[in-house]
Amino acid sequence: MAALASTHRMRVPAYVACSFSLALLAQGCSIPYGIREAFWPTPSVGHQVDSLDGLALEWDASPLFTRADAEMVASGDHVVVQAARGVYEAEAVVAIEAETGRTAWANPGGVMGGMAASESAVYVGTLGIATVNAFDNDKGDLLWSQRIPRGHSVSNLVSSHGALNAFTNDGVFASLRISDGELMETMDSVNTVFVASPQLVLVQQPTLDSLSRLEPASGRAIWVSSFEEDYRDEPVLSADTAYVRTGALVGRVYAVALDTGELLWSTDRNVVSNVAVTEGMVFFLTEEGELVGVSPASGQRVATAGFSPSNLPLNTSDSPVGAYLVAASEGRVFALLGDSDQLFAFSVPDRASPAQ
């Protein structure tokens, strides 16, 4: 594959000095900032669902203490989050049963970076020593672990075309076979490389506010789509669209056509979470305290869940809060509210013919 030339960003918290696990605490490894000397802050607010349109509340679970930059994915019959279940517990990979909200398993994951999932496993990148760990979805057993040569921290993980695409904060891209973690390709790149396969290459451009699709053989740009501000997270991919959430604490969601790079639609600048896609809808959380589902074709609202209190405060050094996250599986969408450490599950109606 041709060399990719652009600019990547560091996406690693300042506290990272070594990989973190319960065993390493005895060896003097620094505790991540989010644990705050092994104590998680008690939430000062509790949310309730006070309005529903096109969704049905199934359950809510708490507490789930998270860092502001934690990640969450849906994997098989579970929703999996980087979190702790108690104020004295260390952060772990925590799997919650999608149907009941009960904890299925928890496994120390190190100081965690990017995360991805398949139906049978969840994949977690580590910070400090770039490694990808695969955990069995049913029991949480470690299936395989792969060190990425020369890499410092796994900042992005994308599952695409039967491979895991990992990118590190110091510019190493690796393609791993999803079944056993075998390294299929590695390369040094000053790009932020999200996906690199014979079918699709997606990278972040030098200005950090655009997405490019490249021709796999030559590295030539097929298209470049620019946004109003930078973005940090990898795009969420569907069959023909990439969804990009811009901004740091708050931003917009853009829908980009994979074939042409056309900007199909964008939201208001009030999105505080990542993006999840299921059942013909695109989901995210807003600063006004709503879980919103929009049509993939038009970006128009087709489902909402409103929370009270309604405003979701942003994370600051003076008033830290956990992550605002969404994840989706067949028939369900999950919303984690980091200011109250609550996880909500909603059922999604079958939308075989999504609204336009």
Image (cartoon, rainbow, N blue to C red):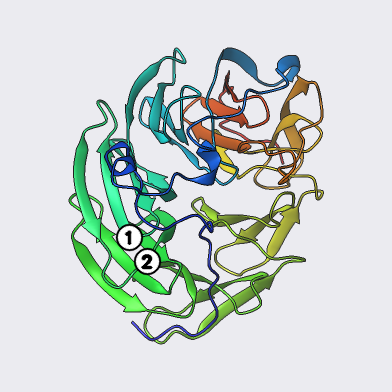
Q: Marks 1 and 2: in contact by CB < 8 Å?
A: yes
For residue 176, which quarter of the picture? bottom left
Determine whether the residue tagged by mark 1 lies in a helix, strand or loop. Answer: loop
Image x and y of residue 351, in percent:
59, 29
Q: How crowded is mark 2: few (under 14 residues within 10 Å), some or many (20 or more)?
A: many
Tell me the distance, in whole angstroms, between the alpha carbons under discs 2 and 1: 5 Å
The earlier-in-sequence mark between 2 and 1 is 1
- Quarter in which the N terminus is drawn: bottom left
Tag 2: amino acid = His
Q: What residue type is labelled 1?
A: Ile
Q: Give above or below for 263 relative to 304.
A: below
Q: Residue at the spot x=27%, y=39% of the render?
A: 23
Q: Residue at horizontal 64%, vertical 72%?
A: 208
Q: In this view, does 81 lie above or below 127?
A: above
Identify which residue, 170 or 220, lies in the foreground: 170
- 298 lies left or right of 311: left
Q: Judge whether 120 appears above or below 9 on screen.
A: above
The residue that disc 1 covers is 129
Quadrant of the frame with the C terminus: top right
Front residue of 90 and 284: 90
Q: Where is residue 72? Give x, y as percent.
A: 49, 38
| Residue occupied by mark 2 | 152
Residue 183 in the image: above or below residue 162: below
Position in image of residue 119 (x %, y %): 32, 36
Label drawn at residue 20: none
Per the image, label 2 sits on a secondary structure element best described as loop
Residue 55 is left or right of residue 159, and the answer is right
Q: Which residue is drawn at 19% across and 47% down?
A: 144
